[in-house]
Amino acid sequence: MPMTLIDLQKALRGLRLSGMSATLEARALQVAAHEYDFLEAFSWLVQDELDRRRSRLLERRYTGSGLSERASLTALDWSYNPKLPKRDVLELGTLRFLDAREDVLLIGKPGTGKSHVAKALALGSSPSCAARSSSSSTICSCAACPRPPATNSPTS
Amino acid sequence: MSRYEKASTIVTSNRPIDDWPALLGDVVVIAPLLYRLMHHGHLLKFDGRSWRLKHAAERLARRTSNA
C-alpha cells in the first residue's frame, strides 16, 4: 500500500531528509509531466537533500564564526584600486596557507580592503574551519584580542 | 602565540610594522611576536584609494541628485 504524499513527507522528515521532503511535491509533478523518469527524479531529490545540508552547514558555520558580513574575493572591484596586491590576495584565496599553518599580515591605509580580505579568507575557509581569522584595525595576538570560538578547533 | 605553527592567524593593521613597537609599547615583547608572525607568514601591503571614501562619495552624490 503506497503512502500518500503527506505521509511520505512526514516519513522523510522523520528520517531527517527535510531537503527531499521540501521538494518532493515539485519533483513528483515533474515526473507526472513526463519531464523525468523515476531515477532522474530520484537523483534530483538526493541532490536537493545534499544541497540543503551543505547550505545549512555553511549557514551554521557563518553564524558560529562571528563574522560581521559575508565578504568575498570575487566581489572585489580590483580596477578601482590597481595598487592592491591582487595576485597575492588571490593566491591566499586558494587557502593553501591554512594547511601550511602560515600567518597573514595585511598592512595598509584605512579603507583599502584589508579587513574585507581577512573576512573573505575566514569565510572561505569555513568548510574546513570557520573563524580562523580575527580582524580589527590594529591587532596583536595578546589575550585581549578576539579568539576563535573553542568549538572551531583547528583541523589537524 | 599559542597558535604559532598550529593554526593560521590573519592580522590586519593600518600602521606600518615599523610603527608597531611605538604603538604597542614594549619592544622586547613585540620583536618575538613579529618574528613568529613573519616566520611562516605572508606580508601583503595594501595601498591606494579608500573604498569607504568612495562609497561615502557615492552616497553623497545620490543624495544631492535626489534633492
Image (spheres, grey):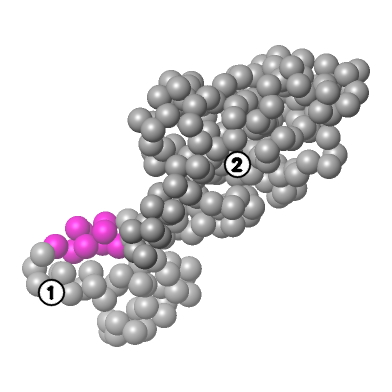
Residue denoted by label 1: A32
How far is the residue under mark 2 from the one under mark 1? Answer: 43 Å
Residue A111 x/y as whole percent:
55, 38
Q: Chain of mark 1?
A: A
Three-letter code for the amino acid on which mark 2 is drawn: Cys
Q: Residue, x 64% and y 19% (percent of image)?
A: B41
Q: Does A144 lie within the magenta span?
A: no
Chain assignment, label 2: A
Relative to the observer, which residue lies in front, A118 or A44?
A118
**In what element is the residue under mark 1?**
helix
- Asked whether residue A113 appears in the rendered view, the answer is no
Q: Amino acid at mark 1?
A: Ala
**Magenta segment: does it hold A41?**
yes
The disc placed on residue A129 is 2
Question: In terms of depth relative to the viewer, which is nearer, B21 or A48?
Answer: B21
On screen, residue A155 above or below B36: below
